[in-house]
Amino acid sequence: MRYLMIQNALTQAVRLSAGLACAATVVAFGWALGIDHQPAPHTGVLVCVWTAAGAALLRAVLLWVRRIHGRRGPRRRAGRVSLEKDPLGDLGSRHLFDEVPYESDGWIKTRQLATHVLLLVAGMTAATFLALPGRDSQQAALQRAGAQVATATIAEPPRVVDTFYDDDVPDRVTGYSSRLRVTVPGGPARLPVGPIRTNERLRAGEHIKVLWSPSDPALGAYHGTSSELRQLADGGWRVDLLDGSAGVWAGIAVVFGLCMLPWVFTFALGVDTDLLSESAWSPVGQSLRALVFLAVAYGCTAALSGDPAHGFQALCLGGSWLLLPGMIFAPVYRMVKDG
């Protein structure tokens, strides 16, 4: 009876740790949707990311403990006497001593599909971390100094520092990168801006939207879209997937997501339920998954804390948005091996 209680407790603990990992991942990417323009640090998202990684690691450890404990249980001892009846009955032997607990086919398929969708969305969200402003960025400095949005006037002829050309038509100019000096109502005579990229050449006297700090004009001004500047000035959480870099990454996510969607359903609904269940309760498989979660969390820590990433951490940061969706293909190895 004590053996049954321990095995059942371990089984429930595994399920709880999996639920915690999923919940923390959902909160992390949901929270991250509203920080596209905000400079780091993003402590709340970072805590959720490491909570998900820690829960995945805990699940793997519990699965190893459950397997080791199961191999030392009454089932092995009963096998020594051929005529000895299983004292725990058929039900206990069938469900509690097996490595994979009984689960309905519908639940297995639904769980796997939800996991794949979550991995795909989390991977696309991790891609946006690559463009997050750091804690030492101009946006962060302006926020700390009490930034506000203003309509600035270009006070001097812009200085073009770079010119961009069409790849197919080398003589065709597609944009300019310019440094500006502007004036704002109630501000100093000149504020430096840029370099900023525009499709057309800017001229003195034109008006642009900028973020600047009345208490510290030496920080200069930052140019961006109206939505981005308002969000930076407010410093609040707000989702705007159709503007600025969020719009760019949202477009990339939609294209990548549509390409991955057939595989999401194929490896959730088109795979044998026994294989999916064995994978979910495999200590080896879940240990590999935990390592991926830890690598992603380690890489994302640099972007979310606002510190520069170097070496292996930079590799984890750059590959995190591919590592997570890549786990969707986990059943391939077993399919090939069994096929």
Image (spheres, rainbow, N blue to C red):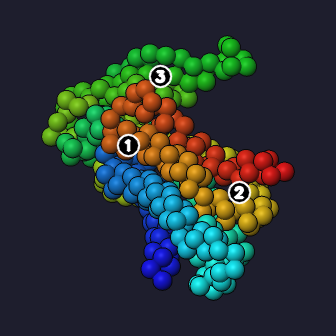
The answer to whether the residue labelled 1 contacts the one labelled 2, judged by CB atoms less than 8 Å apart, is: no
The tally of labels here is 3
Q: Amino acid at mark 2?
A: Val
Label 2 residue SS: helix
Q: Is residue 287 left or right of residue 106?
A: left
- In the rendered image, the vertical position of residue 58 relative to residue 317, given as above or below: below
Determine the CA span between mark 1 and mark 2.
27 Å
The numbered dot on residue 264 is: 2
Q: Position of residue 321 (x, y in %)?
A: 56, 43
Q: Is residue 30 above or below residue 260?
A: below
Label 2 and label 3: CA atoms lie apart by 41 Å
Where residue 274 appears, as percent x and y from the top left, is: 73, 66
Q: Amino acid at mark 1?
A: Thr
Badge 1 crowding class, 10 Å Cα cut-off, few under 14, some 14 to 19, many 20 or more, is: many
Q: Which residue is denoted by mark 3 in the rendering?
A: 177
Q: Is residue 170 visible?
A: yes
Q: Residue at 53% of width from left, 51% of height from top?
A: 287
Dot 2: within a 10 Å radius of its alpha carbon, few (fewer than 14), some, or many (20 or more) residues? many
Q: Residues within 10 Å of mark 3 (few under 14, many from 20)?
A: many
Report which quarter residue 248 is drawn in.
top right
Query: Of residues 176 and 251, which is closer to you in this image?
Result: 251
